[in-house]
Image (cartoon, grey):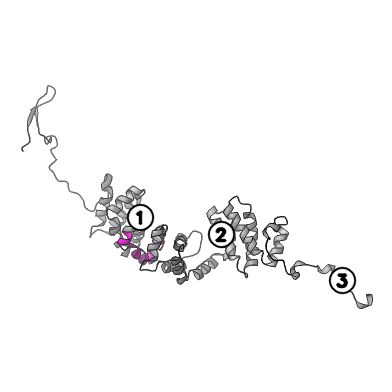
Amino acid sequence: MAAAHVLISGHHASSHQASEFLQDRLPNSQTSFALKADEVAVAYGQRAMPKLVEVLSLPDKSDACSIECLQLLLSLLGNQERKAQAISAKLVQCVAPFLGFENCDICNLSCQVLASLAQLFQGRLAILQASGLEAVIAALGKAPESGIICLQAFSVSIDGSAALLDCSENASEALVHSLQQSVPGPHCSAAVAALQCLANLTRTRQGVSAALQAQLPSCLVTFVNQAAGAIPMLATLCDLDQWSLDVVRYASAALASIAVGPDVKLETYEAAGSALMVLLKCKDSAAAGNAKLAICNTADHPKARIELQKVMKEEAAEYLKGLPDLPPDYRYHVPKAAMMYISPKNV
């Protein structure tokens, strides 16, 4: 049906012919705009994520275009709504192949994008469907820090940990290998992320078995000894003035577990005894309880118990409840100055 044309006149304006769609007032409405397919820009509203995914899906784009697009995507993934839109736009399926690129910047940014999307269940499911876990583990050589952070974000949830343990690539072995290659130190974020990921994986029996097969205990001993020595380093981590409460809790619990061994009781007391005694006065019940347990475990050694009784005269009885008595050699101490030789002639 043809559009009706009406003649509109007015006292203050010249007459003009108006159509149903006001084509006379939009002279360029029939002109097609030349859009750039590889233009990296943020579209309005819900079109933002699909537009960037379309740019990433172009076959002949340059590495600079991919890097710019990934950086822009990463800046937009700041809330769950944006992440859900990205997952619906098939961003995971588009980014997963980038992990096989030789460009390290593209691999790093791709791992960061997947780590952000892995915080949602739909994102983890999409990563599994796109074989993204295997790709991330294979890319740890090119992007160790970003790749481990991605695995750590995936392992926070129970379903993510189960998926990592069931992955065709051995995630525990890859993490232990990355931990061996990292340089010990407080600022090594890759090592911290690897340890957090392994801690999440060892929440189940399957994870503990996988960690033991990957020689995690020996790796941890070597790693800690390279850093500063296991017991002295843990003793420094019991200072609430320098470390957070969570770190102090874990460190004091580790000292309590280490002090169970008969060969390291005295060493634990000598290296961490003073720090544990200070921690006993902590208001946090968990940290104070770990310190008390560690002191009780070290008190099994006679020398450590004697030193404990000297330092904590009033409180020592509370910590020594239930412990066996000291042997006679340690119970009685006679100084050499008090000893006097009595010859048979003086008798």
Residue 240 visible in the displayed image: no
Crowd band around label 3 with a 10 angstrom C-alpha radius: few (<14), some (14–19), many (20+): few
Q: Is residue 156 magenta?
A: no
| The quadrant where residue 145 appears | bottom left
Task: Kindly identify which numbered label has been placed on residue 121.
Answer: 1
Instruction: Name the one closer to the observer, 8 or 171.
Output: 171
Query: What residue is shown at x 83% (from left), y 68% (from top)?
Result: 337
Of 330 and 204, which appears nearest the observer?
Answer: 204
Residue 161: % across, % down: 41, 61
| Cβ–Cβ under 8 Å for marks 1 and 2 | no
The residues tagged by marks 3 and 2 sit, at their Cα atoms, a distance apart of 49 Å
Left or right placement of residue 113 versus residue 22 in this view:
right
Q: Do residues under tags 1 and 3 come within 8 Å of each other at their CB atoms?
A: no
Residue 339, x across and y down, in percent: 84, 70
* For residue 86, above or below residue 163: above
Choose mark 1 or mark 3, whichever is in front. Answer: 1
Q: Is residue 78 left or right of residue 292?
A: left
The disc, 3 or 2, on the residue closer to the chain's N-terminal end is 2
Instruction: Give the residues drawn in magenta, as a range.
Output: 126-148
**Residue corresponding to mark 2:** 251
Q: Earlier in the sequence, mark 1 or mark 3?
A: 1
Left or right position of 328 against 78: right
x and y percent of residue 138 in the render? 36, 67
Q: Looking at the image, how many numbered discs can be counted on the residues? A: 3
What type is the residue that disc 3 sits on?
A: Met
Q: Residue furthest front?
A: 322
User: Can you tell which quarter of the image residue 298 is in?
Assistant: bottom right
Can you identify the residue that label 3 sits on? 340
Amino acid type of disc 2? Ala
